[in-house]
Amino acid sequence: MISYLLTYQKRIIGINSIQRSFRDVNSAAEEYFVKGYGEKASVGKGNPKIIESLFSKYKEAGSGKMEGDGITLFFEHLGVNVASDPVVFLISYYMDAKTMGFYTLEEFQTGMMKLGVSSIDDLRKKLPALNQELNDKTKFKDLYKYVFEFSRDQGYKNIAIETAFALWQILLSNKCLFLNDFIEFLQTEKKDQLVMQKDNWVMFLELVESTRGDFGNFVDDGCWNTMIEQFSQYYARKYNK
């Protein structure tokens, strides 16, 4: 009952605020939300104070950052699988997040403001548009390059080969029919290769794009690097081509 009365009281305060400022609805709405009476921000306009309040629900008390469990819970509430959905990387891209595994308040605010949202519900409404962006060739290429930097351990130029495998499964599994063949090639023919260099990371996306995800469309024009040439030979042996 007490909870109900408090909720009802907040709604009345919000309504009165809007009525007092009916000639300026936007101003009234901002007053309502900034003072903490509302739980959702208006769609299309990020509010730093509301975003900070949202961030505080998921941040670690000690570090002041949103970390592992908090990030997982945030995306769970958003309805996104943090382990398999590439939109997680796109949202991190909008945040300009520097390191995988945590978000700072500044990064979180940056991303939410860029997307014009302040709440989980508002961001959820953006998901269809974000998923469409993943199909934009230019945006996806920028995202793909960003993910490499995002996934590097601090102080290292490359990423672990196993990390590359996991990232490819998330980013390219629906774009590349020969992805598992390529991973198998690296695991068997390049087993001593423990890291993935950035130029090879980028080259693989170029291969996927040039073949439209089907290695049957591969054209050996002599311009591919050694890794791709060797994979071409491996693929031909495997499928007797």
Image: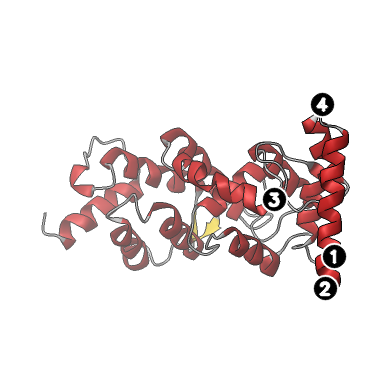
Along the horizontal axis of the image, is 199 left or right of 221?
right
Quadrant of the rendering where the C terminus is positioned: bottom left
Residue ID at (36%, 56%): 173
Q: Are the residues flagged by discs 2 and 1 in contact, CB closer than 8 Å?
A: yes
Q: Earlier in the sequence, mark 4 or mark 3?
A: 4
Image quarter for residue 19?
A: top right
Mark 4, residues whose alpha carbon is within 10 Å: few (<14), some, or many (≥20)?
few
Secondary structure of the residue carrying numbered label 2: loop
Residue ID at (51%, 38%): 142
From where the camera sits, is residue 64 visible?
no
Task: Provide residue 79's location: percent of width, then percent of height.
Answer: 55, 60
Q: Nearer the viewer, mark 4 or mark 3?
A: 4
On the image, numbered disc 2 is attached to which residue? Answer: 1
On the image, numbered disc 1 is attached to which residue? Answer: 5
Task: Provide residue 130's location: percent of width, then percent of height.
Answer: 51, 43
Mark 3, residues whose alpha carbon is within 10 Å: few (<14), some, or many (≥20)?
many
Q: Are the residues flagged by discs 1 and 3 in contact, CB closer than 8 Å?
A: no
Measure how far apart labels 4 and 1 are at the Cα level. Answer: 29 Å
